[in-house]
């Protein structure tokens, strides 16, 4: 049985992403690819990042897989739907079984199935994928027999395999959505093999980074899940758990990357890298012991940082820490259920910088209840903290999150078609219209630059005029 993994993300379609040029390989499907190979299921990975839709389809036509597995998130959803449509409407390809997994599928099961997906994998993918592949292998080998869709005989032996006995999947049976019980998460993720990076051509990634930023970067995962409760954050795959790989294994993986690819830097994709201080201390010891130190970048929370932690990060190779803030207004932070103190956040940003680590932060505008006074507090927060860099987004509700549930009765564009839109397109009733916050982003960035950066004195009046302009635009759209 031929198995193909892909993800339907094409960086060439997004001018903004091309300019940013911070691409990472799809670690999730590489983990599942490794896991399947460990258990005897060879598979192929088509990395679409630097390719195109046509090239992907041509690859499928050429290789004739029996199964296509598509990682699906907010960014890839529309492309995934297009891939499904193309496969199901092409007489030469419509025999292919389509499996979807990833964070986008849990809360849109019936929509994806009715669009043409054959199976949905809900939550963590390794064990479920293996059981489903065993079933499909039996299905392919039993086509000539009179076995039913629901129950198939294993070709070897008399064991009966039921589709409905596979936990963590959804499928259609005679037009009815069948959703099996939730699968228990893997308790010990140290048992998982390293992601199957040999399936990927890293040259365009490393060269893309080098050309855009002057250094190359690769990604590594050390943990699964996040135990925190931020209301806007999706926990569709790993839930509110915290499971971590051993420091020894992580250092071993870094050593392997260093010897094989020699990246200049590493991005740890974990939600809160410093959540467990004992783990961090052991990690710092292991990377030194194994000669596996590579400069790295992480995300953390102010309440999981202190001076000792920052020193340990620095000693183990950390060059940048992103300290989650989201707002400079404690009122908004509390509304998000972030459970952090804005003053503590500023202190940790400054402390990291004092110890020679770059400190970035994230800002979100347009959260329910946010006013101009809250935005002023965010400007003040950024001026005082003066992070090395920061990003600003406008809040949007992802289905399945508490934020979505809080505002779903206040959507302003209920007419959105699911097949042609994503949750990013949803607008809802805020203190001010979305346009207001789009101008507010420019105001924040201008004010922070005005108050923190060294600049030609002749430029200051111009920046002040811009500030007035953005505030006028906010007022006109309030």
Image: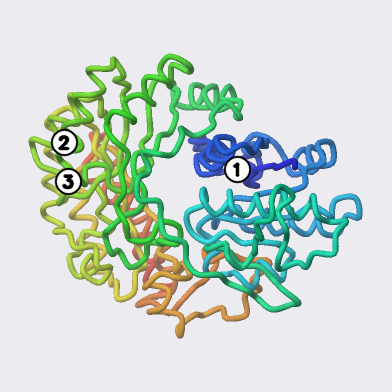
Q: Which residue is mark 3?
A: 385
Please name the residue shown 35% across and 62% down the image: 365
Residue 405 makes an appearance in the image: yes
Please name the residue shown 41% across and 79% down the image: 407
Quarter residue 164 falls in: bottom right
Q: Nearer the viewer, mark 1 or mark 2?
A: 2
Disc 2 to disc 3, C-alpha distance:
11 Å
- N-terminal of the pair, mark 1 or mark 3, is 1
Q: Which mark is residue 352?
A: 2
Which quadrant holds the C terminus? bottom left
Which quadrant holds the N terminus? top right
Disc 1 to disc 2, C-alpha distance:
33 Å
Q: Secondary structure at mark 2?
A: helix
> Image check: 365 left or right of 237?
left
Q: Give the x, y percent position of residue 464.
A: 29, 51
Residue 18 makes an appearance in the image: no
Q: Give the x, y percent position of residue 122.
A: 53, 61
Q: Secondary structure at mark 1?
A: helix
Q: Which residue is mark 1?
A: 15
- N-terminal of the pair, mark 1 or mark 2, is 1
Quarter residue 372 falls in: bottom left
Furthest-front residue in view? 158
> Image check: 257 left or right of 202?
left
Please name the residue shown 25% across and 72% down the image: 335
Looking at the image, which is closer to me, 428 or 324? Answer: 324
Q: Is residue 183 above or below residue 177?
A: above
Local packing at callout 3 (Cα closer than 10 Å; few below 14, some 14-19, many 20+) is many
Disc 1 to disc 3, C-alpha distance:
31 Å
Looking at the image, which is closer to me, 149 or 297? Answer: 149
Furthest-bottom residue in view? 409
Looking at the image, which is closer to me, 304 or 136? Answer: 136
Local packing at callout 2 (Cα closer than 10 Å; few below 14, some 14-19, many 20+) is many
């Amino acid at each position: 049985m031929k198995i193909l993994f892909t993800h339907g993300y094409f960086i060439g379609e997004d001018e903004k992403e091309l300019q940013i040029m911070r691409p990472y390989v799809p670690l999730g499907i590489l983990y599942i690819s490794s896991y399947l190979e460990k258990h005897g299921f060879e598979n192929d990975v088509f990395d679409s990042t630097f390719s195109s839709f046509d090239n992907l389809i041509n690859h499928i036509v050429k290789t004739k897989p029996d199964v296509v597995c598509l990682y699906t998130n907010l960014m890839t959803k529309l492309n995934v739907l297009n891939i499904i449509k193309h496969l199901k409407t092409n007489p030469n390809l419509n025999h292919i079984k389509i499996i979807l997994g990833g964070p986008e599928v849990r809360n849109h099961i019936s929509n994806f199935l009715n669009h043409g997906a054959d199976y949905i994998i809900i939550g963590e993918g390794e064990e479920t994928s293996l059981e489903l592949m065993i079933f499909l292998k039996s299905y392919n080998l039993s086509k000539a027999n009179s076995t039913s869709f629901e129950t198939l005989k294993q070709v070897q032996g008399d064991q009966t395999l039921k589709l409905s006995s596979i936990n963590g999947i959804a499928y259609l049976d005679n037009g009815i959505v069948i959703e099996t019980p939730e699968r228990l998460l893997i308790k010990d993720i140290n048992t998982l093999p390293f992601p199957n990076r040999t399936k990927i051509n890293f040259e365009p990634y490393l060269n893309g980074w080098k050309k855009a930023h002057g250094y190359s970067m690769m990604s590594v995962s050390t943990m699964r899940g996040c135990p925190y409760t931020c209301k806007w954050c999706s926990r569709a795959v790993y839930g509110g758990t915290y499971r971590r790989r051993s420091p020894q294994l992580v250092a071993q993986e870094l050593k392997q990357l260093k010897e094989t690819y020699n990246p200049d830097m590493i991005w740890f994709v974990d939600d809160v890298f410093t959540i467990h201080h004992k783990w961090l201390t052991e990690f710092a010891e292991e990377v030194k012991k194994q000669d596996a130190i590579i400069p790295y970048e992480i995300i953390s929370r102010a309440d999981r940082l202190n001076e000792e932690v920052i020193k340990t990060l620095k000693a183990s190779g950390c060059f940048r820490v992103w300290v989650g803030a989201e707002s400079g207004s404690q009122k908004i932070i509390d509304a998000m259920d972030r459970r952090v103190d804005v003053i503590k956040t500023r202190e940790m940003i400054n402390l990291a910088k004092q110890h020679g680590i770059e400190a970035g932060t994230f800002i979100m505008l347009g959260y329910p209840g946010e006013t101009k006074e809250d935005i002023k507090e965010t400007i003040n927060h950024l001026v005082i903290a003066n992070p090395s860099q920061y990003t600003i987004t406008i809040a949007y509700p992802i289905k399945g999150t508490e934020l979505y549930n809080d505002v779903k009765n206040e959507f302003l564009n209920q007419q959105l078609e699911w097949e042609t839109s994503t949750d990013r397109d949803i607008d809802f009733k805020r203190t001010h219209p979305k346009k207001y916050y789009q101008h507010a982003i420019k105001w924040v960035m201008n004010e922070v630059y005005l108050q923190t950066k060294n600049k030609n004195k002749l430029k200051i009046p111009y920046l002040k005029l811009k500030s007035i302009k953005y505030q006028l635009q906010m007022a006109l759209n309030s």
